[in-house]
Structure formats: C-alpha cells, structure tokens
Amino acid sequence: ALSDILDALKEGENFQRLEEAKQSAGNDMLRTMQIVFPVATNIQMEVIERYGFPSDGEGIIRFTQAVKMYEKQDEEIQQLNQSLKTLLIPSVTVIPSGPEQHNGS
C-alpha cells in the first residue's frame, strides 16, 4: 500500500496538484499542514481503500497505526514510510541563535 501511495503521489495529475500545493505552502510548516496535507490525504484515501481501509479520516488513522506497528517489524515498510514523510514534509532549516542575552547581567 505504501508503494502504491508513493506511486500515486508521483503520477500525472496527482503530482501536479501536490507540487502546486507545496509551492503555495513554501517552507512554512503551518501552511504545509493547511494546504499540502489535505491534498496528500485525499490521494492516500483513494489508495488505501483498495487495501480494505475506509476512504475517510478514520481509514487514514487506521492505516497510519498499522504502518507504525509494521514498520517496527519490517525495514522495507520503515523505509517506504520514511520516503512518504520526506516527500510530504518540507525540510526545516534551523538557524542557531547567538549567545543568550541576560538582562541585568
């Protein structure tokens, strides 16, 4: 199912919709959650239905729980799930802060 989800996210119209959502969200995690995740979730729901999961929010939750359980037992599932996360979650650049300023010191 994870392989099929990854394939579905990379094909034609789905890829285009996802890329447009990513461009709109930029590197902003909140906007990613508001714009990218709903697009990706709709695509995932279409796929998981073929594997016996309901094509709704409950189905996504059940599927995600199953993946978390199985990825502990199977390295391939763990790698596929990591690929899915990498595809959907923007990389975050952390800028180290300078020395802390203490008032009255």
Image (cartoon, rainbow, N blue to C red):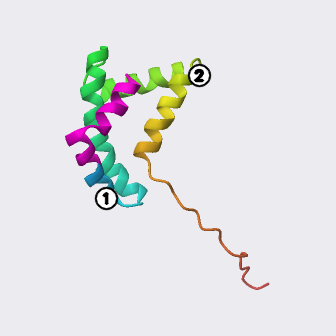
Instruction: Identify the residue shown where x is 58% and y is 23%.
Output: 75
Instruction: Identify the residue shown where x is 34% and y is 26%.
Output: 4
Location of residue 10 in the rendering, given as x and y in whole percent from the top left corner:
31, 39
Q: Is 47 placed left or right of 78 in the picture?
A: left
Local SS, label 1: helix
The residue under label 1 is 23
What range of the chain is rendered magenta? 1-18
> Where on the picture, by quarter, is residue 54?
top left
The amino acid on which the numbered mark 1 sits, given as a three-letter code, is: Gln
Compared to 47, does 43 lie above or below? below
* Dot 1 crowding, Cα within 10 Å, few <14, some 14–19, many 20+: few
Local SS, label 2: loop
Q: Point out the residue furthest to the right here.
A: 105
Q: Point out the residue furthest to the left here.
A: 13
Compared to 15, does 24 lie above or below? below
The residue under label 2 is 72
Compared to 69, does 29 lie above or below? below
Location of residue 82 in the rendering, given as x and y in whole percent from the top left corner:
51, 36
Dot 2 or dot 1, earlier in sequence:
1
> Where on the picture, by quarter, is residue 105?
bottom right
Compared to 75, does 40 lie above or below? below
Q: Is 89 placed left or right of 23 in the picture?
A: right
Q: Nearer the viewer, mark 2 or mark 1?
A: 1
